[in-house]
Image (cartoon, rainbow, N blue to C red):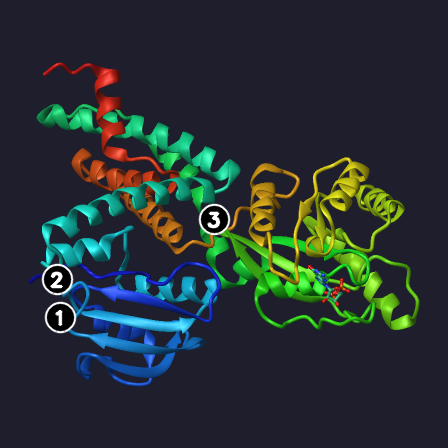
Amino acid sequence: MFQLEPIAALATAPGIGAIAVLRVSGEGAIDIANRIFQGKDLTTQGSHTAHFGTVRNTDGSIIDEVLVTVFRAPKSFTKEDVVEISCHGSEFIIQQILRRLTQEGARLARPGEFTQRAFLNGQFDLVQAEAVADLIASDSDASHRAALTQLRGGFSKQLKTLRQQLIDFVALVELELDFGEEDVEFAHRDKLRQLMLDIRRVLHPLLDSFSTGNAIKNGVSTVIVGKPNAGKSTLLNALLNEEKAIVSDIPGTTRDTIEDELFIDGIRFRLIDTAGLRQATDQIEAIGIERTQQKMRDASLVIYLFDGKNSSPDDLQTSIAEIRSSGKPYLLVGNKLDAITENERQTLETIAAEPIVWISAAKHSHLDTLKTSLSSRVRTDTAVQTGSAVVTNARHYEHLTGTDDALARAIAGLDVGVTPDWLAMDLRVALRHLGELTGEITTDDLLESIFSKFCIGK
Ligand code: GDP
């Protein structure tokens, strides 16, 4: 039985649920959990005991109330010291707790890593191990793809280009190592410094976006608009899975704008339900509509929801004209699919003459299609992208800081004229983290770059 360095990860399925469980495993896992936990001294608690308390930020503010379960080696899944933290199932809370854990010394687990440790400590037999190996392989592939797609658009491309340039420099520095005693300098130090500064300039806004304030402020502001009774509140509730908005049969009862967050494929959507787009009939409603228009002006994306059951062809045409004239990127969403016939659906589609995402908000059906449409719209439509990518993923945060720290060390090293081997070490660390961010493996690239460019031929 042996214990490896502490790792942490979400153990329950990602997404919004009532409860989420985070798992920390490895040497010092209990110490780490204890440093972010307030309520009891976890280090003195026995195995298989549960403790109620709070997880705190470094400034002492509460992130969440949690239930912590302590498992002492070897009586745990991994046979290492394990702490399981049950928190509320909000993506935001999960990411914040993971961030605290990494700040206190845990590393984010790679896909399948807990299982791998369990296997290393003899928790499985050979047949099981083979199945696990497959799982680990497929998981990490998926996570690499996810890493690529989550770092949206320009940032990912920019980082890739910069990373390639850094690889070229590392190859030159490595080449200097081969000439050991001869004191040669193939890698132009000023250019290398400039490149590292450039990379850090790209990293910093991404890093900033992870901080609490920005994570809440940024994201894709999304409004749900549509006529009264289209089902906007029902849709909002369905998406958020809770009774936040007031649903009612009386048109125009959603008088205030209600705002909430939704995470789809790592993208943060700020959802705003509104008073609807109809003409004002009384004063309170008029205030609501004023706000709707304001919100639409501020929003990056509009979900235009119409009632598939009670919309006449004329209604639909006017609505589409209205929403088009606003000039905002929008998704046309038809609700109450459960209450119409296939013929009625086709008629409305012909009239609309543009793609409609059909759902039934009340029956929670086809919400996945809507979610996919939302996230792919953000990824593909530059008009929706607010210009700043938002890091919502703790894994990305870890590799962003990893790159940044390594580059800071390398630059500091350049300033005092360190030897190429020290420089190469920091650069390699930076490359490894950058590779994790852009979904590429570094070592092979490095070798390829060295041999293709220099043909050392030794
Ligand atoms: P809002 O005014 O746009 O916010 O609409 P509400 O969400 O308050 O819904 C208006 C009415 O439509 C309510 O009676 C809902 O139960 C009903 N409704 C909402 N979604 C659906 C749906 O998918 N199918 C059916 N049949 N009725 C729905």
- Disc sitting over residue 3 in the figure: 2
At label 3, the amino acid type is Leu
**Tag 1 or tag 2, which sits nearer the N-term?**
2
Question: Seen from this angle, which residue lies furthest left?
Answer: 1
Q: Nearer the viewer, residue 12 or 441?
A: 12
- Which residue is rendered at x = 60% and y = 56% of the image? 365
**Tag 3 or tag 2, which sits nearer the N-term?**
2
Report, in whole angstroms, how far the alpha carbon at label 2 lies from the one at label 1: 9 Å
Query: Can residue 119 be seen by looking at this rendering?
Result: yes
- Please tell me whether mark 1 or mark 3 is closer to you in this view: 1
Q: Are marks 1 and 3 in contact (CB under 8 Å)?
A: no
- Please tell me whether mark 2 or mark 1 is closer to you in this view: 1
| Residue 60 percent location from the top left of the image | 41, 77
Q: Quadrant of residue 48?
A: bottom left
Report, in whole angstroms, how far the alpha carbon at label 2 lies from the one at label 3: 34 Å
Q: Residues within 10 Å of mark 1 (few under 14, many from 20)?
A: some
- Which residue is rendered at x = 46% and y = 45% of the image? 150
Ligand 1 within 8 angstroms of badge 2 C-beta? no
SS type, badge 1: loop
Q: Kindly identify which residue carries mark 1.
A: 73
- Which residue is rendered at x = 47% and y = 56% of the image? 210
Q: Are marks 2 and 1 in contact (CB under 8 Å)?
A: yes
At label 2, the amino acid type is Gln
**Tag 3 or tag 1, which sits nearer the N-term?**
1
Query: Can residue 303 be seen by looking at this rendering?
Result: no
Image-based side of 280 in relation to 389, left or right = right
Q: Nearer the viewer, residue 399 or 413?
A: 399
At label 1, the amino acid type is Ala
